[in-house]
């Protein structure tokens, strides 16, 4: 039989493996090789591939220079419908076609619970893909792996972050950084009786830490899964970050090395007694996901509350404070980008996103000329870069560098009447007092030109003369009354 005929004779292929002469096995996994983030160079490494199936990752490790790969599988996963697994037939067929010897590529039928140094030796790298959720005792499995791993581990798993069969399926998962794992005694997950558990990525990371790994990062297959097969996640960790660091995807590296991981960040929000739930949802989703502590302060005097909250965070030892207004909406990516800009602009005291005021009020920032005069008309072309120097900003989602705040004498927020000692036009509000003091202390505020946050505003929905909607701001209603074309 030809190689192609041998491949075609196999009843099932899980992995899509490129073989010589342009032949590829008819499997479907892995979906996205790059998301696994295994090292490009495995030269000299001894690798363990747990749950090897047809051997894609075994052979991939060898292609990347591994000196030896040991593959194990107990063939317990039948995808919920396969009557019989092929055993090592498909693996052996590919191994022979690729020309690997037993010395560099061995395999054995073995349960992960039976792993031992006496049986397998020790390993520099462990692949644990598509397996942990098939195990009745996942934490025990991680402890077994940890006992023979001197370097890094890479995990791929079903993820509970975006899918829970108990909470409505897709989009019903636990995506607010909960440390949760669900148990499936029957076929609740994917109609597969061997799917015992699904962890959130936060839970998976905690389990890795409990098993003795460090430098742990977790990431999803996609931020917006559209079906169950896309509700997957990854994790990596290591025993020694200096000699055998764990890889992460580019965006995780940017997060770790671009501001969040190397700066201690906390957030403070001054909230009214009654606020917008939409803002609360945005805040919880972003802060929990990025592991940023959040404190809220409440009281009748906004500036006093915010200054008190900022001082408390400074005393806790943080490097950067994020201030959040109760009527701002934003995403996790907005927070990540603001913190990245804070990291790459070490001379900046504040990073301010683009944020409009309510109604027709313009963008909440101001520019000054070389002579120090406030500029009324700023061309859009000045916002083409990543950041622009500004004189004033807002506190909707703004990052402040603590070491620069410490150079500013108190009070930071203080309302001042106008020249007639009245609180009408010409007064200085608490927030403008802060920005003027920041400027007097010769600190630099930068507008994040590509980060936009929203301003929540109550609207009235009226029926017009055709009973179609007419939207009006509450301010406009109080100033002008109902729209002229409302239903009468």
Image: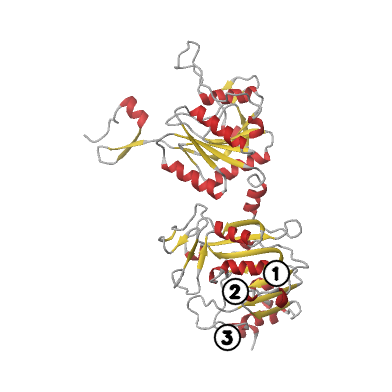
- When asked about the image quadrant of residue 482, the answer is top left
- Name the quadrant containing residue 389: top right
| Pair 2/1: label in front | 1
Q: Nearer the viewer, mark 1 or mark 3?
A: 1
Judged left or right of residue 162, residue 348 is right
* Gap between marks 2 and 1 measured at Cα: 27 Å
Mark 2 element type: loop
- The residue wearing badge 1 is 148
Sequence-wise first label, 1 or 3: 3
**Residue annotated with mark 3:** 9
- What residue is at 53 percent from the left and 48 percent from the top? 288
Q: Quadrant of the N terminus?
A: bottom right
Give the CA separation, mark 2 to mark 3. Answer: 15 Å
| Image height of 333 relative to 426, above or below | below
Can residue 390 be seen in this snapshot? yes
Q: Secondary structure at mark 3?
A: helix
First in sequence, mark 2 or 3: give its number.
3
Q: Dots 2 and 3: beta carbons under 8 Å?
A: no
Which residue bears the numbered disc 2? 15
Give the image location of residue 468, x and y in percent.
28, 41
Crowding near the residue tagged with mark 3, few <14, some 14–19, many ≥20 C-alpha atoms within 10 Å:
few
**Residue 343 in the image: x percent, y percent?**
66, 41
Q: Residue furthest top?
A: 420
């Amino acid at each position: 039989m030809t190689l192609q005929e041998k491949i075609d004779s196999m009843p099932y292929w899980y992995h899509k493996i490129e073989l010589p002469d342009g032949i590829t096995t008819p499997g479907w996994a892995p979906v996205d090789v790059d998301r696994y983030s295994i090292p490009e160079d495995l030269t000299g490494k001894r690798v363990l591939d747990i749950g090897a199936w047809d051997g894609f990752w075994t052979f991939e490790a060898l292609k990347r220079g591994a000196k030896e790969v040991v593959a194990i599988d107990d063939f317990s996963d039948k995808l919920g419908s396969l009557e019989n697994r092929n055993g090592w037939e498909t693996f052996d067929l590919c191994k022979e076609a690729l020309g690997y010897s037993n010395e560099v590529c061995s395999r054995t039928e073995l349960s992960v619970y039976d792993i031992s140094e006496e049986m397998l030796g020790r390993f520099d790298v462990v692949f644990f893909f598509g397996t942990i959720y098939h195990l009745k005792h996942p934490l025990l499995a991680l402890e077994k792996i940890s006992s023979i791993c001197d370097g890094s581990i890479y995990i791929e798993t079903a993820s509970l972050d975006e899918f829970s069969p108990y909470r409505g399926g897709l989009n019903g998962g636990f995506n607010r950084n909960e440390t949760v794992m669900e148990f499936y005694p029957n076929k609740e997950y994917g109609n597969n009786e061997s799917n015992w558990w699904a962890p959130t990525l936060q839970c998976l990371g905690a389990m890795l830490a409990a098993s003795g790994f460090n430098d742990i990062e977790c990431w999803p297959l996609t931020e917006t899964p559209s079906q169950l097969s896309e509700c997957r996640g990854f994790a990596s960790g290591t025993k020694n970050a200096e000699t055998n660091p764990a890889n992460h995807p580019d965006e995780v590296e940017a997060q770790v090395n671009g501001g969040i991981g190397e700066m201690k960040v906390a957030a403070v929000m001054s909230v009214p007694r009654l606020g917008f739930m939409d803002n609360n949802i945005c805040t919880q989703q972003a802060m929990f996901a990025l592991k940023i502590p959040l404190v809220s302060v409440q009281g009748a005097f906004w500036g006093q509350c915010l200054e008190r909250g900022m001082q408390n965070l400074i005393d806790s030892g943080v490097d950067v404070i994020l201030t959040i207004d109760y009527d701002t909406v934003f995403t996790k990516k907005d927070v990540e980008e603001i913190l990245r800009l804070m990291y790459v602009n070490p001379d900046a005291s504040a990073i301010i996103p683009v944020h409009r005021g309510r109604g027709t009020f313009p963008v909440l920032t101001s520019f000054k000329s070389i002579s120090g005069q406030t500029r009324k008309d700023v061309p859009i072309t000045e916002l083409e870069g990543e950041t622009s120097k500004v004189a004033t900003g807002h506190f909707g989602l703004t990052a402040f560098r603590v070491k620069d705040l410490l150079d500013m004498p108190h009070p930071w927020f203080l309302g001042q009447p106008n020249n007639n000692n009245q609180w009408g036009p010409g007064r200085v509000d608490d927030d403008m007092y802060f920005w003027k003091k920041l400027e007097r202390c010769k600190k630099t505020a930068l507008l994040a030109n590509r980060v936009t946050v929203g301003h929540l505003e109550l609207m009235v929905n009226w029926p017009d003369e055709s009973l179609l909607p007419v939207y009006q701001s509450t301010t406009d209603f109080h100033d002008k009354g109902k729209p002229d074309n409302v239903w009468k």
